[in-house]
Amino acid sequence: MQPLLRKIVVAILTWEAQMALKRYQPKIVAVTGSAGKTTTKDAIFAVLSDGRFVRKSEKSYNSELGVPLTILGLESGWGSPWRWFLNIVHGFLVIARPSSTQGGPHKYPEWLVVEVGADRPGDIRTIAKWLRPDIAVITSIPDIPVHVEFFNSPHALAQEKKRLAEYLKHDGILVINGDDVHTKKIILEHQDQAVSFGFEGQNAFVASDMGIQYEDKRPVGMVFNCDHSNTRLAVSLFGALGKPRVYAALAALAVAETAGVPQELAADSLRAWAPPPGRMRIIEGIKGSLIIDDSYNSSPAAVFAALQTLKEIKGFKHKIAVLGDMLELGRFSKDAHTAAGKQASKIVDLLVTVGLRSRAIGEAALDSGLAESRIRPYDQDEAERAGKELESDIDKNTIILVKGSQGIRTEKTVLEIMAEPLRAEELLVRQDADWKMR
C-alpha cells in the first residue's frame, strides 16, 4: 500500500474502531512484549471463551492497522485499494447498524483480546492512548529482543512497551512477567495494579515442576504446577513444547482470575488449547521423525529457549536444528547469531543454517567444536531446498527443530519434511494465497 493511502486508511479505520469501542464498550485485554505475544494472546482467548463472546487478533494483527481491524472484525486488504475501501465501508456498518442483544451476526463481542506491537518508538503510545485496555499483559523484554533495530537500546524498547500500562483504565489490571529484569522495573512503577507471573517465588502466579510430557515415548506437550494464593493447580498443555508456552499459560491463568474465570475451568481450557502454527508446534515428520516447528519468527531469547527444549527432549538418537536469520536486530545481530551457534554446537548432530546472517551461527558452531561436515549453510531464498536435502538425513530416531525469522520463510523447510504436506494449510504458518505469492 502506498504511504499516503496507508495514512488515510489508518486514520479512517482508527476513528471507526474508536467509535465501535465507545458504542459497544467491550472489555479489552491488550498484550505486548518482545516475545510470546501471539501465544499469550491465544492462551488468554482460550480461557476467556468458555461462556463468553470473545474476539482475538487474527494472526499477528498488532500494528496501527492491525488493532483497528481486530476491533472492527475485518481482514487485511493487503495491497488492494479496493479491499481497503470495502474494509472502510464494513467498518462504518459495524458502528452504524442496529445492535442485537439476542446474539446473531450483529452482536458485538463482550471481550476483545488484542496484540499491540512496536517496531519504532511511539508505536504503542499511539495505539494505547485511545485503546485504554481493562487488562494490559506484558510478556517479556529480553536483553536482545526482536524489533530492537529502531531503538537506541533494549531499555528504550522496554520504555515503549511500558506505555500500555500507563494507558490502562483507572481501575485496570497489569498482568506482567515477574522474572524479566526489564519488566520487574515496570512492576515497581505500577505496584497497585500489577499481578505478576513467572517461575520465581515472588510472583503471584508461580510455575513449578515444569517438564515435557510423553506418550509412547514421544513428546506431546508440557506439564507444570501453578501455585497461587496457597493453592496448587496441575496444568497440562498439548501440541507444543517449551518454557515460553508455560509462561503464556501462566499469563492466561492470571487474566482468568481477573476476569472471574475459576482456575480449574481455565486449566481445562488450556488443556484443550491448540497451539498456533509455527510456535514450537509438534508435527509428525517423514520416515517416523518428529518436527518442532518454530518457523513463525525468531529472536535471540526464543532461539535459546527452543534449543534448550531440543536439548531436554529424550528418546531421539539424532537431533537436527534448522536455524534461519534473526532479523531486525541491528547492531546486536552478529553477537546474537554467534551465541546461537555456540549453543547449538553442544546440542545438535547436524546444523542447517538459512540466510546470510545465520552463516555466523555455523561459523560459531565450527569454532565451538562441531565438525564442518555437520554444518550445512544455505542462502536466504533456499529454505525449500534445505528441506529437500534433509530427507536423506532423517529417520525414525530423528527430531528436527526448525526456526527462523518471518522473512526467511522456514515454513517451506517444514513443508518438505512433514509427514502430511496436504495438511499444510492447517498446520503451518503463512499458507494463505497472499503469502504464497511472495
Image (tube, rainbow, N blue to C red):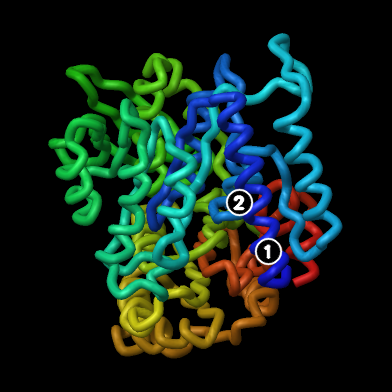
Q: Is residue 387 above or below residue 306?
A: below
Residue at 63% x, 51% y: name it: 284
Q: In this figure, what is the number of numbered marks?
A: 2
Q: In which quadrant of the rendered view does residue 228 lie?
A: top left
Q: In which quadrant of the rendered view does residue 204 lie?
A: top left
Residue at 62% x, 44% y: name it: 15
Task: Please report contact status of discs 2 and 1: CB closer than 8 Å, yes or no.
Answer: no
Which percent across, then down, holds residue 339?
31, 77
Q: Residue furthest right?
A: 82
Disc 2 on helix, strand or loop? helix
Residue at 20% x, 19% y: name it: 229
Give me the disc on residue 66.
Answer: 2
Q: Which of pointers 2 and 1 lies earlier in the amino acid sequence? A: 1
Please identify, in this view, whether the residue under mark 2 or under mark 1 is nearer the observer: 1
Give me the disc on residue 6.
Answer: 1
Give the position of the C terminus as an image quadrant. bottom right
Q: Is residue 235 above or below residue 278?
A: above
Q: Nearer the viewer, residue 109 or 88?
A: 88
Give the position of the N terminus as an image quadrant. bottom right
Answer few, some or many: residues within 10 Å of disc 2's Cα (few below 14, many 20 plus, some between 14 and 19). many
Q: In which quadrant of the rendered view does residue 251 lie?
A: top left
Which percent across, then down, holds residue 114?
52, 41
Disc 1 on helix, strand or loop? helix
Whether residue 229 appears in this view of the structure is yes
Q: Amino acid at mark 1?
A: Arg
Residue at 55% x, 32% y: name it: 112
Q: Residue furthest top?
A: 102
